[in-house]
Image (spheres, rainbow, N blue to C red):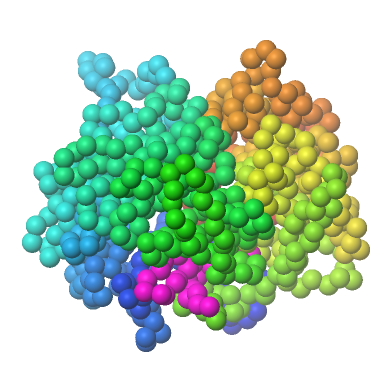
Amino acid sequence: MTTSAVLGASAQQQIMTPDLLWALGRVHMEDVNKDGTKVLYGVTRYSLEENKGERDLYIYDTESGTPNLVIDLPGSESSAVFFDDTHIGYAKDGQYWITEVGGTPQPLTQLPEGSGNFKPVQLKDGSWMLLFSVREKVSETPGEMYPSLPKAEFKVIDDLMYRHWDHWNDEFVNHPAFGKLDISGAHQLTTGGFTHIMQGEPFESPIPPFSGSESFAVSPDGKYVAYNTKLTTGKEFAQSTNSIIFLYDTENGDVIEVPGRSGYDSSPKFSPDGRYLAFTSMEHDGYESDESRLAIYDVRKKFTVIVGAAEDQVVEYINDFQWTSKDELIVNVPFHATQRLAKIELGRLREGEALSYELEYLTDGDYNYQGFHYAKGNLFAERQDMNHATEIYSVTEDAVTPITHVNDGIYEHVDMSNVEKRMVPTSDGKEMLTWVIYPPDFDPNKKYPTLLYCQGGPQSPVSQFYSFRWNFQLMAAQGYIVVAPNRRGVQGFGSEWNEEISKDWGGQAMRDYLAAIDDVAKEPYVDTENLGAVGASYGGYSVYMLAGIHEGRFSAFISHCGLFNLESWYGVTEELFFANWDIGGPYWTNPAPESYAEFSPHKYVQNWDTPILVIHGGNDFRVPENQGMEAFQAAQLQGIDSKFLYFPNEGHWVLSPQNGMVWHSEFFGWLAKHLKE
């Protein structure tokens, strides 16, 4: 369905709808050319009829001010780079390709099935190296175990991590690899032409389920390839976040361990002169939401320095970074429920001494700045807010200017919501930043049903994100005021605020939620007889918890992939380091962690008395489906108006377009039934 068809022939002003949401192009920046005059980016568009998306590549020329379509082929292209101003490379169908702008694509590789995570890098001598991952078989298949029973379907499991996030683990692991890339096309990179790092080892790199090509880097002279991995498998892998960065010497095959810390060490990047390797580092093993600090490794002297912001600057998490010179970086950091870009100038590194820096913010305002690229003094960044999906902007000292306008044709016909920043007093005497999103036609003389949005994570901030599922603009357009508090535990407000959620899931965070809805409910335009609470993951847990303690505040609940019974959840979830850190460990220890007795929603289910919609995916292995089934069954057996929306082929997130439309239909149908009728 075309954008004009979704908008209608008249293209008159209207509100955001699920159809319009799916009609939006999803923009992602890929690369910037050497002199910073051209931006390469992709746009993914979804077809509801075909139930899939396709991605095309564009180049924006800053001199002409126009975008040009470069790749318009069936399927999706990714990992794209400028080889030069007239040739680009991209990954597709497990291989890496080159095309002249306006020309015919040619494959540069003929790699084994399962290759991926492509990262082409130009070395200082002008040549190109391709970093990528290959799949290696490290154990028997079921068919090899019982070759005389070819139709048998089974799994034999003798260790943990047999499934992860949304898939069952198999006999293969990912390993890093590299090889020279001939962009002339005269010679393809084939199986015999690349080096397989970690061959024969059972460990994975990139680390699943979310790591990708950012796990790899190569020094400017091509001497070292950096990668990270966890030297654990099975039960140990499930209980540890300790990852290590290694340098592989491309000349002699030696491997050097980069000194780091006990948690995640990730995202290695060499300085332009190759002297230093920067990476993000966490201190504590098992704490996936620990402070993510910048670490600098001196390649020549072989020591690492942990770098931190000055005490008066609230930065506890480095989302991303890029070197701009041998002693300067640009970083992406959370700041008071937004994401900003800032510049860091490094001082002299001394072994054994911590190094602090002053952040010079390059952006401000109520926006989320995300991926960014810097070249020759030109900075380009992705930006979104609660009323706008991602577009790409040019960032200078004087202005932040959009260079893509992919979704202007839709947004110019959509009435926007007013987003208010409200400071709410908490029960322990602190202030909590809470976003309040109003319907587009808001009239303070009327009353509106109001939703409390409960965030997941539990450490993820309620920033200026634009979700294609939990979309505040869409919720407000249906006539709801949305209250979205940055309760205890989220990042961007200092370490103390961030850490107060661990082992206290159902404590202060719940009091923060109630403080937020009670504060906003004082306003005369809030219909206190029609309040709802909605959320996913930890937010879904929060909904289950509030259902047992809300004391009549709410008239409807919706929980998506929420945790209901912490004991049964501990027995089926996969990343046990998360449960061990945030809950306190297994339920069978003596004494058992207090979380099981005090903060498990099923302990309060006898108090449930409010209609609840339960949503769950069959391939959610972080919060498996039994959690939703237990909650729904408890509601049903107590005679509570309840519904179970089940997606057998979705995981923690609903990703299919048609499933997404069903999700929104059931979501808003449930709210309308209980808060509007």
Camera-nearest residue between 207 and 628: 207
Main SS, magenta residues: strand
Query: Which image quadrant is residue 550 in?
Result: top right
Q: Residue at x 73, y 70 (%)?
A: 418
Q: Is residue 372 magenta?
A: yes
Q: Nearer the viewer, residue 75 or 503?
A: 503
Residue 376's image quarter? bottom left
Q: Up-down: is 430 above or below 638? A: below
Stretch of the chain drawn in magenta: 369-397
Percent across and percent down for residue 414 are 63, 75
Front residue of 124/662: it is 124
Left or right relative to 675: residue 381 = left
Q: How far across and how far down the image is residue 625, in percent?
A: 57, 32
Q: Is residue 448 magenta?
A: no
Left or right: 619 with respect to 521? left
Give the residue drawn at x 22%, y 18%. 147
Is residue 300 in view? yes
The C terminus is located in which quarter? bottom right
- What residue is rendered at 47% in x and 76% in y? 394
